[in-house]
Amino acid sequence: MCSLEKRGNVWVLTLVGDDPQHRLNPTLIDSLASALSRLASDATPGSVLLTTANGKFFSNGFDLAWARAASSSAAATDRLQFLVDSLRPVIAALLSLPMPTIAAVNGHASAAGFILAISHDYVLMRGDRGVLYMPEVDLGLPLPDYFTAMMRSKMRSPAALRDLVLGGAKMTAAEAVKVGIVDSAHDSEERTVEAAMRVGEQLARRKWVGDVYAEIRKSLYPIACTALALTQKAIVSKI
C-alpha cells in the first residue's frame, strides 16, 4: 500500500505496509496507480509530488515470491508478466503527471524499484545505506522494454548503464551522483526527505502550468514515451 498526504503544495506519497522491502505486488501497484490518478485530477499550479518509503528499502522490485507461489511454472511466468504489464501505466502516469516529481530514495532501489525511482524528475538518495541495483542479469530475467527505455532516457553514461544492467553492479548513492543518476546524496533517511522537501518547496513556488510542464517533460524522453505508448498533446500557449 501507499499513503498520500499534502504538505503545503507538496504531495508526499509514501510506500508503506507490512512488507519492509516494499516489493511491487498487485496491491501496491494498484495503490500507486490510484494515488497518481488522484494527483492528476487534483493538480494545481505549484503542485509537486515527493515519493519515498520507510525503512531500509525504497523498493526491492517486483514481488517475485508472489509470482513463484503460483501453481505451476507457467502460472508463475504469467504472474510476473502481469506485474510487468501492471507497472507500465504507473510509469506512464509519472511521465504524464502535471507537476514536478521528486524521489527521495531512502534505501535500496532495485529492478522495478529502481525504474520507479528514476521515473521521477529529481532523485535524491540516502548515502549511508542503500544501493541501486538491476539484478535481472543475475536472476536470468529479461528486461521489459520500458525498463530499458527509461534507463536509456535517464542515464547519460553508457559505461554506467553497461555496468548496472550487464554487470549487475550495485551502485552507492555517491557513485550514482558521479554518473548523474542521482542529484544529491544525504547522510540519513530523515535528511534525504528533508532535502527533497526543500527542493519541492522551491519548485512549488514557480507555480508552473501543470499540463505544459508534463508535455515538455514528455518531449525530453521520446524513447521512453514510445515504449509507454505516450503521445504529446497540443497545448495552446497563452501569450
Image (tube, rainbow, N blue to C red):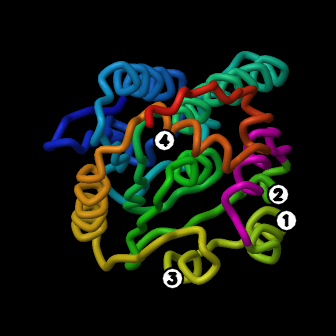
**Circle on res. 137:** 2
**Circle 1 is placed at which residue position?**
166
Sequence-wise, the earlier of marks 3 and 2 is 2
SS class, disc 1? loop
Crowding at dot 1, Cα within 10 Å, few <14 / some 14-19 / many 20+, comes out as: some
Q: Is residue 27 above or below residue 144?
A: above
Crowding at dot 4, Cα within 10 Å, few <14 / some 14-19 / many 20+, comes out as: some
For badge 3, the amino acid type reads Ala
Sequence-wise, the earlier of marks 1 and 3 is 1
**Circle 3 is placed at which residue position?**
174
Q: Which residue is drawn at 56% across and 28% down?
A: 235
For badge 1, the amino acid type reads Leu
Q: Give the range drawn in magenta.
A: 141-156
How far across and down, in percent of the image, does residue 174 sit?
51, 82
The secondary structure making up most of the magenta span is: helix
Q: Residue at x 59, y 53 (%)?
A: 114
Q: In this view, does 133 lie above or below 33?
A: below
How far across and down, in percent of the image, does residue 63 sit?
58, 36
